[in-house]
Image (cartoon, rainbow, N blue to C red):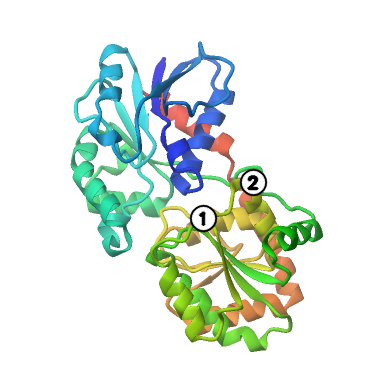
Amino acid sequence: MKIGIDGRGAVWYRGTGIGTYTDQLLHHLYTLDQKNTYSIFFPQDELFPWTDPGRFQQIPLDTHKDTYLEDTLVDQFLMDQPFQVYHVPQNGIGLPKDKYCPYIITLHDVIPYILPETCSKAYLKTFMEQMNHIVKNADHVITVSNHAKNDIYHILGISPSKISVIPLAPEKIYRPMDRNTCKSYLKDHYGLDREYILYIGGMSPRKNIGAIIDAFHLCQKKLSKNYCIVIGGSHGRSYEALRLRCESLGLAGDVLFPGYIPLEELPIFYNGASLFVYPSLYEGFGLPPLEAMACGIPTICSNVTSIPEVVGNAALLIDPHDIENLAEKITLVLESPSVYAIMIHKGLQQVKQYTWEKTAKKTLEIYLSF
């Protein structure tokens, strides 16, 4: 069987859920599938170090993420090659309008329909313009949670029989590490020498980062240690408002914004943290809570959308709009050694059910059904 995959998201969106998904899916398919042949589209000069080009052909395209929707390079290749199936992992964006073979897409969420005000204008425009033909042309949809499946069915009208739920997973780099070593690294490289509450993720308004700041303001004086907050992620459009919020609450020296954190440093930040907080308003899946739990860090999450499905009873769940309850939960976890220990254990057990090997295996089963 000859399988085509748009792998460009593994390069363009690395550090996001979609980028991580594409990267890990490709690497694990390469290890798992010794029978079928693959053609993977990549940006020029951004190829993977694979050593079996006969089985996994990498096709470099002279393309850019800001203009690739205007080119026809993939269409030309699909027209000339006898693919049995073609998979677009980045929400189907870039799926050809003409049909050359069966098409599979991975649709991670339908946030532009539910919370359009939280999306960038460029992404919202692209998503809305593309989704009609994507839905029309997709023979099968992979999504990442049952909650996302229900949203896709109700909003886009895609039959549940055409939608498969295949969860994501934390990468193997996320594991318990020596905490003192991690804290020493963070002190040397970031000047971070306090116990801290961590958030990792984007700065879209739907991430609800302001709730962390407000809750910390309520409970800071009740905590027995001199904690600070670390908000890890690229300085998005909410950054300036969040910075001003910290200043207005007298927390300018207690909330750190280190900006983009390289992938290799993320496990260090997780392992150095005392607590991970993720009060997001909407997630198709939400990888950071699992990454934190895989590192042995107690986690507090929202009780909405896919998050309870993903974290089970291993995290403390809160109404993301209830700031007082979030402050109470932060205090409970940090001031109760028994609760703290139980949450570490539950988190490490919960993440065992998620592996990229399982994700790749279930995805391959979808390919082989065509």
Label 1: state its secondary structure. helix
Q: Quadrant of residue 269?
A: bottom right
Q: Amino acid at mark 1?
A: Val
Direction from residue 183 to residue 367 in the image, left or right: left
For the residue carrying disc 2, how many other residues have a C-alpha within 10 Å: few (<14), some (14-19), or many (20+)? few
Task: Name the mark nearer the viewer: 2 or 1.
Answer: 2
Direction from residue 51 to residue 369 in the image, left or right: left
Q: Quadrant of residue 239?
A: bottom left
- Place of residue 301 in the rendered image (x, y in percent of width and height, measured from the top left): 53, 67
Q: Any mark on residue 264, and which?
A: 2
- Place of residue 184 in the rendered image (x, y in percent of width and height, measured from the top left): 78, 60
Q: Residue beneath label 1, please?
A: 310
Among the two numbered marks 2 and 1 on one chain, the one whose residue lies closer to the N terminus = 2
For the residue carrying disc 1, how many other residues have a C-alpha within 10 Å: few (<14), some (14-19), or many (20+)? many
Q: Amino acid at mark 2?
A: Glu
The answer to whether residue 349 is visible is: no
- Front-most of 176 and 254? 254
- Front-most of 332 and 227? 227
Q: Give the residue drawn at x 31%, y 58%.
A: 119
Label 2: state its secondary structure. helix
- Place of residue 85 in the rendered image (x, y in percent of width and height, measured from the top left): 34, 22
- Front-most of 45 and 136? 45
Q: Is residue 85 above or below residue 355?
A: above
Q: Give the residue drawn at x 73%, y 80%.
A: 225
